[in-house]
Image: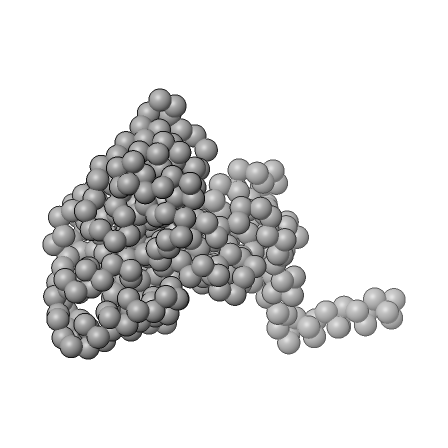
């Protein structure tokens, strides 16, 4: 992990039972723990730090990836923190103070299991009556700091954010052209690439995945903007139930940039090489580009993964060889049979 030695990182820390925040600058996690424990009068042995927004434990390497002035929670050895759902004060300061909201918040505090607390919070937010209020908070000046002025809503920016990631995958496909020596193969690869571009344009680069205003089958988040980690490539669910709402604050938006849209079948190790190999022996019109499009750019092969759950080693998953080429039409099958008969007669 690259870091500037001698440079301190400024953060904001608080305890789990006090809303007051304190600015601390530290040259590493150890120094942060020492300063924080002294400031908040907590015992140093066993002390640890978590992200305020989702409760992720901060390690030494993870510390240096965090944005400046991020809010952290300092905990003693026996304390836990599962994210913003622990902060009852934040819930009770929301715009609506209906009896149902307050009762749900009380249940949130009384339940010790973090997965259940998250579910209560999700249900609570989803049942707020005035949905328009959520989108009406778009004029959040702090949230938009560092965001291009052309984006007038959070949804518009988040959609662009997703599109940018997908465009990055497309660029990796285009870069593979440089590795092709044969002109004919390069020409077929360019045809295939152009076809993938047209498919992406039709789908608007799948920006809908991060857009909370999209319909449920198309978005990866709730109406309120909560995203849940889908676990590593070899897991069905995230065992830690990581969740985040990048729509909620500028801090969360920045942290969300560390989450990955991870390819289960890896694009560089498996998908792009399989496409190249297919085009070495077949025309682009014979290759099942719909299959490769799904693997490269859609949720068919993409999983939204928290940085902690993102496994960088080889996935050891390969493309389905039966799907790489288009099925032969009945006419083509008949021609092949006819050719076979002629060879047999000769």
Name the residue at 60% across, 38% down. Answer: 181
From the viewer's side, name the closer residue of 239 and 200. 239
The one of 95 and 103 positioned closer to us in this rendering: 103
The image quadrant that residue 282 belongs to is: bottom right
Q: Is residue 258 above or below residue 221?
A: above
Residue 170 in view (yes/no): no
Residue 298 lies left or right of residue 82; in this view the side is right
Task: Indicate the position of residue 3 as horizontal and vertical percent values.
Answer: 40, 29
| Residue 143 horizontal side relative to residue 62, left or right | left
Relative to the observer, which residue lies in front, 120 or 103? 103
Color encoding of the figure: one colour
Q: With 326 as the anchor, is 213 left or right in this view? A: left
**Residue 121, quarter of picture:** bottom left
Residue 161 picture location, percent across and down? 31, 51
How far from the left and from the top, in percent, is residue 94?
15, 64
Q: Residue at x 55, y 52 (%)?
A: 266
Look at 27% across and 48% down and name the residue there. Answer: 15
Q: Residue at x 23, y 56 (%)?
A: 248
Q: Is residue 265 visible?
A: yes
Query: Residue farthest to the top?
Result: 6
User: x%, y% of residue 244?
Assistant: 33, 57
Tally of marks: 0
Asked whether, in this view, residue 220 is left or right of residue 95, the answer is right
| 132 or 94: nearer the viewer | 94
Quadrant in which the C terminus is drawn: bottom right
In this view, 117 is above or below 282 = below
Quick check: 99 above or below 187?
A: below
């Amino acid at each position: 992990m690259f870091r500037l030695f001698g440079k301190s990182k400024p953060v904001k820390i608080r305890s789990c039972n006090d809303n007051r925040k304190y600015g601390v600058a530290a040259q590493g996690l150890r120094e942060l723990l020492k300063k924080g424990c002294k400031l908040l009068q907590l015992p140093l042995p066993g002390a640890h730090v978590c992200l305020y927004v989702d409760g992720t434990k901060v390690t030494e390497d993870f510390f240096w990836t965090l944005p400046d002035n991020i809010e952290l929670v300092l905990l003693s050895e026996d304390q836990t923190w599962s994210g913003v759902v622990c902060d009852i004060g934040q819930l009770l300061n929301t715009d609506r103070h209906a009896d149902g909201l307050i009762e749900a918040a009380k249940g949130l505090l009384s339940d010790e299991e973090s997965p259940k607390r998250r579910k209560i919070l999700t249900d609570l937010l989803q049942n707020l009556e005035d949905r328009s209020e959520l989108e009406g908070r778009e004029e959040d000046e702090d949230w938009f700091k560092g965001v291009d002025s052309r984006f007038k809503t959070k949804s518009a920016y988040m959609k662009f954010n997703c599109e940018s990631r997908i465009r990055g995958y497309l660029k990796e496909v285009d870069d593979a052209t440089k590795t092709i020596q044969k002109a004919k193969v390069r020409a077929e690869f360019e045809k295939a690439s152009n076809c993938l571009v047209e498919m992406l344009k039709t789908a608007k680069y799948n920006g809908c995945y991060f857009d909370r205003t999209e319909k449920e089958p198309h978005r990866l988040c709730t109406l309120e903007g909560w995203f849940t980690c889908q676990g590593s490539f070899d897991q069905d669910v995230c065992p830690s139930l990581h969740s985040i709402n990048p729509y909620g604050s500028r801090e969360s938006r920045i942290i969300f940039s560390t989450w990955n849209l991870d390819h289960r079948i890896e694009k560089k190790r498996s998908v792009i090489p399989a496409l190249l190999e297919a085009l070495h022996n077949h025309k682009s019109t014979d290759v099942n580009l719909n299959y490769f499009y799904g693997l490269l750019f859609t949720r068919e092969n993409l999983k939204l993964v928290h940085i902690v759950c993102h496994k960088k080693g080889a996935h050891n998953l390969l493309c389905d060889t039966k799907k790489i080429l288009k099925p032969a039409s009945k006419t083509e099958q008949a021609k092949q049979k006819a050719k076979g008969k002629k060879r047999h007669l000769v």
